[in-house]
Amino acid sequence: MIEKIEKIDGKPLKNIDPLVWIKAQANKKDRPFFLAFCDDGVVWGGFVDNRFQTSEGMQGISPKLSLNILHQAYAFGAQDEIRLFKDETGAWQARCIDDVGYEVIVESQVLWGSRAYAPEAGFTRVFDARQHGLDHIVPLEVASSRLDPDDNGNECLRLEVHHLVESDAQTGEARIALSRLAGLSIGKRDLEVAK
């Protein structure tokens, strides 16, 4: 189900601070992860010691979040995703997306980073050994040896994505109506493909 969020506590979305609101949508049980795309990088968020924290401003890598540089943001977990984005007029829009009523294709995408610095305060800065400068700071504690192929690491960061399939009963045609974020983890680099 895809639900347009037009009012929050009785107020139109345009009358609230959408950045404060979307960060508040993350919660330890249902939506433990947060991801924001900004002009100058990504900001990850998650729960560290039962408290929601983001990577904003960390180590000079992660940008400081502000509406001026924000393009879109997500609070997500296995059950659903809350998405904040700008429409073609530049107005903020929000959606709640879950898997109800759809056939779901689950995809586990490999995220950037084959090396990691030592975890710090529940977050880990990851990078690729061959391409410096595209680092990001994820809300997981990751030992570099788990990722580093030169250190026999056979794992990677994985972003779980649910593709919602919509079928037309008359034509039998199926298409991916929408995709949503569903999880973040450390997993095997080589996965078995379901057949």
Image (spheres, rainbow, N blue to C red):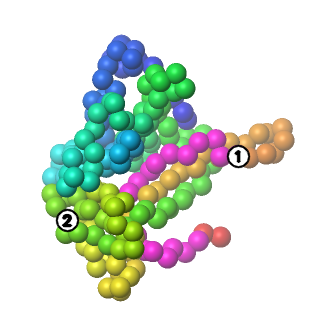
The residue that mark 1 highlights is 175
- Horizontal side of residue 133 vs 95, given as left or right: left
Closest to the observer, 195 or 91: 91
Give neighbour class at mark 2: few <14, some 14-19, many 20+ (Cα, 10 Å).
Answer: some
Q: Residue at x 29, y 33 (%)?
A: 66
Q: How far, Cα to Cα, is label 1 from label 2?
A: 40 Å
Give neighbour class at mark 1: few <14, some 14-19, many 20+ (Cα, 10 Å).
Answer: few
Closest to the observer, 124 or 181: 124
Residue 179 in the image: x percent, y percent? 55, 46
Query: For the C terminus, which image quadrant?
Result: bottom right
Q: Residue at x 42, y 36 (%)?
A: 71
Q: Residue at x 34, y 30 (%)?
A: 68
The stretch in magenta equals 175-193
Q: Which mark is residue 119?
A: 2
Q: Are marks 1 and 2 in contact (CB under 8 Å)?
A: no
Above-or-below relation of 114 to 67:
below
Q: Is residue 82 visible?
A: no
Our reading of the magenta stretch's main secondary structure is strand
What secondary structure is found at the residue carrying circle 2? loop
